[in-house]
Amino acid sequence: MLTTNNIVEKVRRVELRTSKLANDLMTGAYQSQFKGRGMDFEELREYVPGDDVRTIDWNVTARMRRPFVKLHREERELAVMLVLDISASGAFGSSDRSKREFAAEVAATLAFSALRNGDKVGLLLFSEDVELFVPPKKGRKHLLRIIREALAFPAKKRGTSIRAALSFVNHVLHRRSVVFLLTDFLHSFDATEGRHELFRELGQTNSRHDLVCVHLHDERERAMPPAGLLLLEDAETGELLELDTVRNSTRLAFAEKSAQRLEHLDRALTQSAVDVVRLAPDDDFASTLQRFFETRRRR
């Protein structure tokens, strides 16, 4: 159980580490990729020689019987929404941190980069339900709250519903925003989730916003070492499974099933035209994100 002092210490550590990562690696790549989407109306005025004729508002011109132009300015500020999975599977971690802690570091790095770009940042935490919504804002105090909630907000439910989280986002964000979905996708194909409904929601979110799926995975979820007889428990469902990991056939079957799950996931995300970047706790994740943003920019 995390105490208040533990939480404060963890928040400070994450702030220091991710601030440096954002400053050294991420901010330039982020700025080149996310610059402001669209134009804001600024003013309507009479045409003067030299104005671009393409800016003439023909409806107003017809009513006033003299030419008027509609002027816009580029919208520079974005809203960035971090949609973070805090279901029970996030407690797993084979390295020095859990997937939940890793997700908080990735989210903090993205938040730092966004704020340094002049953007607002919000947070949505979800399990089976939406657990917490923090509207997009600016400022260091707001950033520290995002880190604290991402690290330590106590989830009330154990399961996962990505579809419910994205549906909530689509209802509360009325302007086009950048949405980072951070999840392990472990239960995205469950019958209770409804894979077709899930990926339809992904497609709808991507059409309304700029959706980036950040797939957080642990290598032990893809390959199992020969560790003897193990009793495994599904953190979200409580289902128990006994495996003899000494047997090569057991480890091979586990790896094949994991590879098949990832293949199905990648195919579905491709069909939804959603960008995805895959990160593991042992990765140099800031460099991976930097390369991902640069690839998107070139594309």
Image (spheres, rainbow, N blue to C red):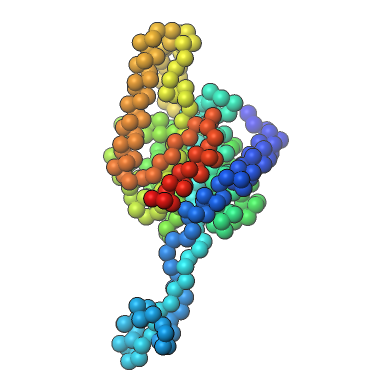
Residue 193, how many percent across, how many down? 34, 35
Q: Identify the residue at the far front of this view.
A: 298
Q: Is residue 150 left or right of residue 140?
A: left
In this orientation, which residue lies closer to the viewer: 157 or 245? 245
Instruction: Using the rendered view, name the quadrant where residue 41 is placed.
Output: bottom left
Image point (34%, 36%), residue name:
266
Residue 260, how many percent across, how many down? 32, 26
Q: Identify the residue at the far right of this view.
A: 5
Instruction: Using the rendered view, name the quadrant where residue 120 is placed.
Output: bottom right
Q: Is residue 143 left or right of residue 185?
A: right
In this orientation, which residue lies closer to the viewer: 33 or 199? 33
**Is the residue 244 above or below the residue 85 in the image?**
above
Q: Is residue 179 left or right of residue 115?
A: left
Residue 82, how many percent across, how many down? 50, 46
Q: Is residue 26 left or right of residue 58?
A: right
| Quarter of the image that includes the N terminus | top right
Residue 287, how many percent across, how many down? 53, 40
Q: Can the viewer see residue 146 in this picture?
A: no
Q: Identify the residue at the far bottom of this view.
A: 65
Q: Can the viewer see residue 257 in this picture?
A: yes
Image point (38%, 18%), residue name:
254
Image point (44%, 36%), residue name:
278
**Is the residue 294 above or below the residue 103 in the image?**
below
Image point (43%, 20%), residue name:
223
Q: How many numbered discs?
A: 0
